[in-house]
Every structure is written in C-alpha cells, then in structure tokens.
Amino acid sequence: MDPLSLTALGGMAAAEGIKFLYGQASELIKAWLARRKGDQGETVEVPIVANDILDRAPTAASANVDVLAEQEQQLLQLLSALSNYASGLAPIKLGDAVLEGNAARLRSILEAVYSQRFTFRGERRAPTGTRVRVDQAIDELRGIATGYQGEIPAGGTTEVIQKTRIVEEGAELRGVVNESRTPVDEP
C-alpha cells in the first residue's frame, strides 16, 4: 500500500481525492450487490467516477469480482469511516494519520480491483493506469495458483512475480491469465 499524504495534496485536492475514492468505492459496492442478483461473470463493469483529481484517465473500468468478494467487508468499513469527509460533514485535517491511512487503504483496494494505479495530480508516484504488480510466495503448491486473472486493458500492464519452494506433480502455476487475449510477454 502506497502512503497517501493529504498535506502534500493540499486542502482542496485532499477533499476532492477523498470524494473520488469514496464515490468510486460506493459505485463498486452498488454494482457488487446488483451482481449478486444477476450476472455471475468474472468481471463487472463499473465506470470510473467523473473527476478532475486524477493525473490522467484510467485505462479501463473492469472490476475483478474475486478481489471485490475478498475485500467487500473492508470496503464497507472504509466507506463508513470516510463518509463524513466525503460528504463535507467533517473537515479534512491535513496530516491526520488515521484519515490518511483509511484513504490509502481504500485507494489500494481500488487499485487491486481495477488492476491499475489511481494517482492524484501532484503526487509523486506511478501515473494513473499503469500496471499493477503482484508478488506471490507459495511454500508448497498442490493445485492451481494464478497470479493475475483478468483483462489487461489497452495501455495497461500487469507484472507477476511468483516464487515457490515445492511444486507437486500435477500442480499448475499460472502467472497471467489474460482474458482480453492481448499478447503477454512470458519470461
């Protein structure tokens, strides 16, 4: 998880950043709840909330449902923790470590769900839309392990680093399962 410095962003940008993160997470949860009632695909399309805070446009709006399923409770907790700030009911205090931590965790989950960075204007980190890196360490592999499964959007990349100590006969270690069929460089 990359740190998020509200002080570095400044007052207005920090408020807009929290509003964006809150809005995007809210849309994800709404789509996730609607998905339970209908389609059961591996991704769900959740458009990126209109904003002026990101340094550039994200590369895609496909959300990985496996990550959503795993992070649903954490998303709900973070939405609750940030709701008063996102709605303007509570003032954003620059340098508030708890607020910055919650915002950073929420951004980290959104980046995992969308497999790309969300970088605010003025931040010193990889730009929005750039690749997501997955590091996977497995002691004993007995079944199938996949580092990343999903669509790799145009302009985006995914890097998977996998280490195993023992791979049992018949086990399968997959780096990237590319559902968009975009060519993937295999090491």
Image: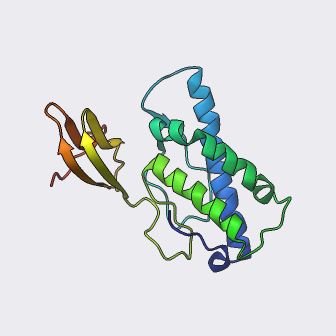
186 or 161: nearer the viewer = 161
* Residue plotted at (78% across, 68% down): 92
* Residue plotted at (65% across, 59% down): 102
| Placement of the C terminus among the 4 image quadrants | bottom left
Name the quadrant containing residue 116. bottom left
As drawn, the residue found furthest toward the top would be: 38
* Residue plotted at (62% across, 30% down): 33
Q: Is residue 61 left or right of residue 96?
A: left
Residue 79 is situated, as x and y percent measured from the top left of the image, at 70, 49
Residue 98 vertical placement versus 28 (above, below): below
121 or 171: nearer the viewer = 171
Q: Is residue 27 left or right of residue 55?
A: right
Residue 179 vertical placement versus 104 (above, below): above
Q: Is residue 45 visible?
A: no
Residue 151 is situated, as x and y percent measured from the top left of the image, at 35, 42
Residue 3 is situated, as x and y percent measured from the top left of the image, at 55, 69
Q: Is residue 6 left or right of residue 175?
A: right
